[in-house]
Image (tube, rainbow, N blue to C red):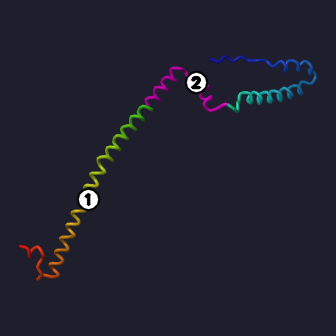
Amino acid sequence: MVKLSQVEDESSFQEQPANASGAAPAKEAQAEESDSESDSDFDDDFDENETIYERIVALKDIIPPNQRNSLSNFASSIKSGINASGSYLWIITSSVLLLGVPAILAIQAEAQMKEMEKQFTLQQSAQDVLAPGTENKDEKKV
């Protein structure tokens, strides 16, 4: 893990004895110096060329190993569940397309044939109503 230790700034110890008579200006200078140091510390920590992947890898030290393992197991189980559901969905979809579409087309063709027969019988009955004395071709043959 990371061990923190406080580092004393040598320049602040050297300036204090030199400005013993003017304590207020020394404190102001020290405050300005510490502000500029904190800004430079932030700049040192920030690397513009660091990628997101490198940042995520650096976060690995923050999460304890047992939690990392449990998170990894959870993520892998979610991934395997999604893969399995995708496979099942593919099987169901392809089965419906291979079996359902031809069946629907056959049913539609049969319904169309019934509709054509119905129209034909309606036309025949309409002809019989309009010309009741004429004989059909079928009746002449018999």
Q: Residue at x 85, y 18 (%)?
A: 13
Q: Is residue 18 left or right of residue 105?
A: right
Residue sticking out furthest to the left: 142
Mark 1 highlights which residue? 109
Where does residue 83 sit, x and y in percent of width and height? 42, 34
Q: Nearer the viewer, residue 124 or 53?
A: 124
Q: Residue at x 16, y 75 (%)?
A: 125
Q: Residue at x 20, y 70 (%)?
A: 120
* Kind of residue at disc 2: Lys
Mark sitting earlier along the chain (1/2):
2
Taking 119 as reference, is 111 above or below it? above
Where does residue 53 sit, x and y in percent of width and height? 60, 30
Residue 116, picture quadrant: bottom left
Q: CA distance from mark 1 to mark 2?
A: 64 Å
Where does residue 92 sit, x and y in percent of width and height? 33, 42
Mark 2 highlights which residue? 60
Q: Which mark is residue 142?
A: none
User: Where's the C terminus, which quadrant?
Assistant: bottom left
Give the extent of the magenta segment: 50-78
Residue 27, picture quadrant: top right
* Kind of residue at disc 1: Ala
Residue 100 magenta-highlighted: no
